[in-house]
Amino acid sequence: MKRSAFAGPYVVWMILSTVAPLLFVVYFALTDRSGAFTLENLAKFVDPIYLGVLWRSLYLAFYCTVICLLIGYPAAYFLASKDFARNQALYVLILLPMWMNFLLRTYAMMSVIEDTGMLNNFLKWLGLQPMEIIGTEGAVLLGMVYNFVPFMVLPIHTALKKMNVRLIEAAEDLGAPPAQVFYRVVLPLSLPGIVTGITMVFMPAVTTFAISRLLGSGNFFLFGDIIERQFLESNDWNFGSALSMVMAVLILISMSLLNRVDPKKEGSGAY
Amino acid sequence: MKKLAFLLALIFSLLPAAALAEYITVFNWYDYIDESVISEFEKETGIEVKYANFTTNEEMYAKLSTGAGEYDVIFPSDYIVERMLAKGELAELNLDNIPNRSYVMDWLQAPAYDPTGAHSVPYMWGTVGILYNTDLVDVEVNSWQNIFDLELAGEKSVFMLDSIRDSLGVALCSLGYSLNTRDAEELEAAKQVLMKQRAEGIVKGYLVDETKDKMISGEAALAVMWSGDAGYAIMEGDGNLAYVVPEEGSNVWIDAMCIPAASQKQELAEQFINFLCRPDVAARNREYIYYHTPIQQVADEMDEEEKQNPAFFADQAIIDRCEFFHDIADEMEMYDRIWMEIRG
């Protein structure tokens, strides 16, 4: 038996769960209700309303990725450091939220930041002005970061762990100050982890849908919401597929741009 | 080849067993039945019930039309019954198998969406109205202006329904137009009402399922709501919530029980429908989900205070100023477009 045969079950799985649906999406996107070829669905997308929603999804996902990186990198750095070697508690704490379904976590977040939620009740108890968070873009961003930050920490942590400590020692021996060691040695070596982290955060962030409803109180749509709407409300699978296709192409483009940062594909290749 | 043969043998050995056990597949709204009723039906008849749920009419219709499953009893709303009937997608019921249908109120025996009454049996009905918090609202609430006028409503005070037809319908009612209009100018005017409401910051959010809990905790002063959800909030709340069907009129709706034409188990399905019409069973469902019952006897046995509350029961005066939805599937794209402009 050839070794490639071992991949058989997964190949079957992939054909059923990825390739076939992808073909369906392309088929629906390029046909009308009667099944005739058309580009109308794609043309319908070029409209300030839908482009505006896409733009909002893109910048919220961008902010989310930047914030996750700013929070996640130092956390991963600390997790991988020697000071931390014997203490796994923090690592478990980062993983812990992922044991729960993200919808449940988002519902919980909703009841915390509501006007009458825990946070505001606490502020009122302290005699402070309550904050209006729920229903804003900020609330959606908060929910995204809350849900996706572990996906940034873990790959960076793995990359830093894999790093040969002697390289750092060598840099120090040669007289590099700590800042220089970080910028010239640690950061470049952890780049594959960063690339994977960005991918794993940006992709779910840009396709987010439920979070915007729960934390944004349905006050604005994200791209994922309008795709969902086409299938569940408007019953327009063709347009919904066209929107999905646009999203897939955008992700593909951004991933190929990102790949240039990591040409040797040292990132664990989450995509 | 051997493996394949084994697999086929396995499948065929399972098939007869599945075919022998009597079961029906019921497709109902989420959280829309007292589940102990289902097990009681199974115990009484020996028919197993496979139960599936949906959230909106559109979702249910989409699943039915793709043939994603075989359903024997479905619970579409009035305008979907109308659509399915026109397309011949509903089985004609054998009313001899549903004697309990006679318990249904007179005015619901042959409703406009099913004039002969031979393709559907009402399950629940209700209205669309305003649920408000008496601690947070100090004006009288009896008009749609209460949610569209900044002076009356206040900022960030209103939860709207995340549902095209209901929200647009409310705006049309406030202008005195029909809920079922296809007139582009009237729809445009309704759109302006909703856009102004949003631009002035009156809207707190567009939600469906979450609204009742938010109203209980006092997140907003007013909400557009279906009567049953309002009833739930009133029952679970601190006694500061009230429901009104505005005087300009609103939507009255019926969720019916139907059998898809494709069902192979019409007789079993009819037994299930008949069971749900039995007054003691209907009473349990009403007490569980708080929607208006179509069963006259159950309504007669409600206590007076509950019957006076429009959240639990609409009297003739309310019904008279309300309108049913009709199917506008062909105009859906225009509705969709309007909704995107308001929400996007």
Image (tube, coloured by chain):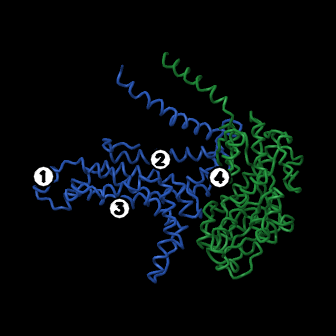
Chain colours: A blue, B green
Q: Dot 3 corresponds to which residue?
A: A71
How many neighbours does mark 4 have within 10 angstroms: few (below 14), some (14-19), or many (20 or more)?
few
How many neighbours does mark 1 have within 10 angstroms: few (below 14), some (14-19), or many (20 or more)?
few
Q: Amino acid at mark 2?
A: Ile
Q: Tag on residue A251?
A: 2
In front here: B77 or B191? B77
Label 3 – label 4 distance at C-alpha: 39 Å
At mark 1, the secondary structure is: helix
Is B116 drawn above or below residue A177 in the view shown?
above
Which chain hosts label 4? B
Task: State the image quarter where residue B213 is shown.
Answer: bottom right
Q: Tag on residue B30?
A: 4
Q: Amino acid at mark 3?
A: Ile
Q: Residue at x 79, y 62 (%)?
A: B251
User: From the viewer's perspective, is A191 left or right of B217?
Assistant: left
Do labels 4 and 2 touch, CB within 8 Å?
no
Mark 3 or mark 1: name the one nearer the start of the chain: 3
